[in-house]
Image (cartoon, rainbow, N blue to C red):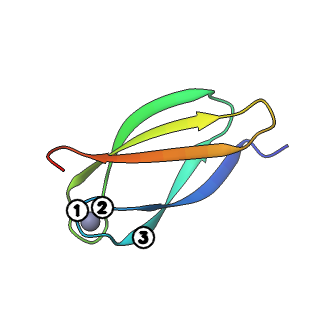
Amino acid sequence: MNTEDTVQVQCPYCAQSFEVLVDCSIEHQEYAEECEVCNRPVELIIDVSPEGEVTVTTRGEDV
Ligand SMILES: [Zn+2]
């Protein structure tokens, strides 16, 4: 089973898609990642199901 997965997310500021590396061994995590394009902090809320399916929700600070 993969312990890491690459998930494509969309920046809430500039709508650019970029990839984040997710640690699938952690069921739920929240952290901020800087957008590669506009360099603003994108909040990532990551949930991993028992089947290993990764769901990523993005949130901007002021969007
Ligand atoms: Zn951006």
Q: Is 43 rendered above or below residue 18?
A: above
Q: Amino acid at mark 2?
A: Cys
Please state, as top left, top right, bottom left or bottom right, where the N terminus lies in the image: top right
Q: Residue at x 63, y 27 (%)?
A: 27
| Mark 3 neighbour class, 10 Å CA radius: few under 14, some 14 to 19, many 20 or more | some
Q: Is 59 rendered above or below residue 28?
A: below
Mark 1 lies within 8 Å of ligand 1 (Cβ measured): yes
- Which residue in the rendered view is the most extreme toward the left? 62
Image spot of residue 29 (x, y percent): 49, 30
Q: Amino acid at mark 3?
A: Ser
Q: Is residue 38 left or right of residue 12?
A: left
Nearer to us of marks 2 and 3 is 3
Image spot of residue 55 (x, y percent): 59, 44
Report the disc number at residue 17.
Answer: 3
Image spot of residue 58 (x, y percent): 38, 48
Q: Residue at x 69, y 31 (%)?
A: 25
- Tell me which label, 1 or 2, sits earlier in the chain: 1
- How much space separates mark 2 and mark 3, taking CA atoms? 9 Å
- Contact check, label 1 and label 2, Cβ < 8 Å: yes
Q: Residue at x 24, y 69 (%)?
A: 14
Mark 2 lies within 8 Å of ligand 1 (Cβ measured): yes
Q: Identify which residue, 49 or 29, lies in the foreground.
A: 49
Mark 2 lies on residue? 35
Q: Is residue 35 left or right of residue 50?
A: left
- How much space separates mark 3 and mark 1, taking CA atoms? 11 Å
* Picture quadrant of ligand 1: bottom left
Q: Is residue 57 left or right of residue 41?
A: right
Indicate the secondary structure of the residue bearing disc 3.
Answer: strand
Q: Amino acid at mark 1?
A: Tyr
